[in-house]
Amino acid sequence: MSDGKKTAVALIGAGIMGSAITRRLLETGHQVHVFDLDATKVGALVADGAVAAETAAVATRAADFTILSLNSAAIVRAAVFGRNGVAEGASADKLLIDMSSIDPVDTAQMSAQLKADTGMAWVDCPLSGGAPGALAGRLTIMAGGAAEDFERARDVMRHLAANYTLMGPSGAGQTVKLINQLFCGVMFQAVAEAVKLAEAGGVDASQIPAALAGGRADNRIMQEFMAKFAARDYSPTGRIDNMLKDLNSLQAFALKTGVPLPMTAQVVEVNRLLCAAGLGPKDSAEAMRLLDGDFT
């Protein structure tokens, strides 16, 4: 850290993202107390300099900031309010930063409950950029919460994010993450279909990103993934089942708010079909198998 200050951070959830966040914080001089139900994951981070915590409560007591990196609202609720959870180690001088991607309504409810029960504030900070973005400190983070808590969280976020934006009150960050996933889900499907159309027309699809660069259709997903899809490169960059999880949350929020999302609904079903075909743990490029009629 450039200012020489060593901040204590608790990290709850040592999956792919949580591990990348931990390693970046260690690299930038933080002390990181890690808790996960999987001791092997924790052990790998301890080898890199993290401190193992017996419970989420123990990790929270030892830290100024507690970061959550978990897979669903139900898991977040259990990690915060369950036995030996964050709430048991919480106090008004600490701050919870939820970097999970979960439902905005659930987020607002849990934020209010934690504040009322313990005085600990909550900032929702879902991210875009994946593990590579975390390791490079180049994440895009859309935040929700009180302005003063958003600014306080900047002490940690400045080491993780290149773009850190307050979108509104609690839950607003999660709403914008759903919008981010709407764009990503629709664009991944558009890239897959564009590859097939190019191939049918005798065009080298890998050349299309360069040809369309700077035009109205230009976008990062096309630039980063079209050649990958065209090459049927199925190496992992993200999981289809994680995309489906976010799209399901998006649909659920749309139902709660009465917002029609006809295009998104079709993309949800495509991702559901891919998961039903056993491709859930695979990369989004596997969408090409559906269009190719190849599930070998």
Image: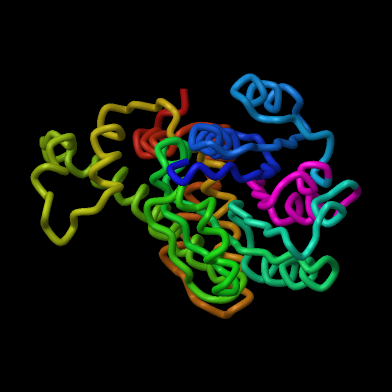
Residue at 74% in and 37% down: 35
Q: Which of 89 and 275 is in front in this view?
A: 89
Does the magenta segment cover residue 82?
yes
Identity of the residue furthest to the left in this view: 211
Left or right, 143 with reference to 58: left
Identity of the residue furthest to the right in this view: 83
Q: Is residue 279 visible?
A: no
- Expressed as whole percent of the image width and height from the top left, the position of residue 295 reads 46, 28
> Would you identify the image quadrant in which residue 137 lies?
top left
Residue at 41% in and 28% down: 294
Does the magenta segment cover residue 230?
no
Q: Is 218 rendered above or below residue 202?
A: below
How many numbered marks have been drawn onto this rendered protein structure? 0
Identity of the residue furthest to the bottom in this view: 258
- Expressed as whole percent of the image width and height from the top left, the position of residue 161 reads 43, 50
Which residues are drawn in magenta? 58-83
Left or right, 172 with reference to 197: right
Left or right, 91 with reference to 193: right
Q: Is 118 rendered above or below residue 292?
A: below
Residue at 77% in and 42% down: 59
Residue at 65% in and 35% down: 14
- Expressed as whole percent of the image width and height from the top left, the position of residue 269 reads 51, 53
Q: Nearer the viewer, residue 268 or 45?
A: 45
Q: How is the image coloured?
A: rainbow
Q: Is residue 133 visible?
A: yes
Identity of the residue furthest to the front in this view: 4
- Expressed as whole percent of the image width and height from the top left, the position of residue 275 reads 56, 40
Left or right, 83 with reference to 93: right
Q: Which of 159 and 72 is in front in this view?
A: 159
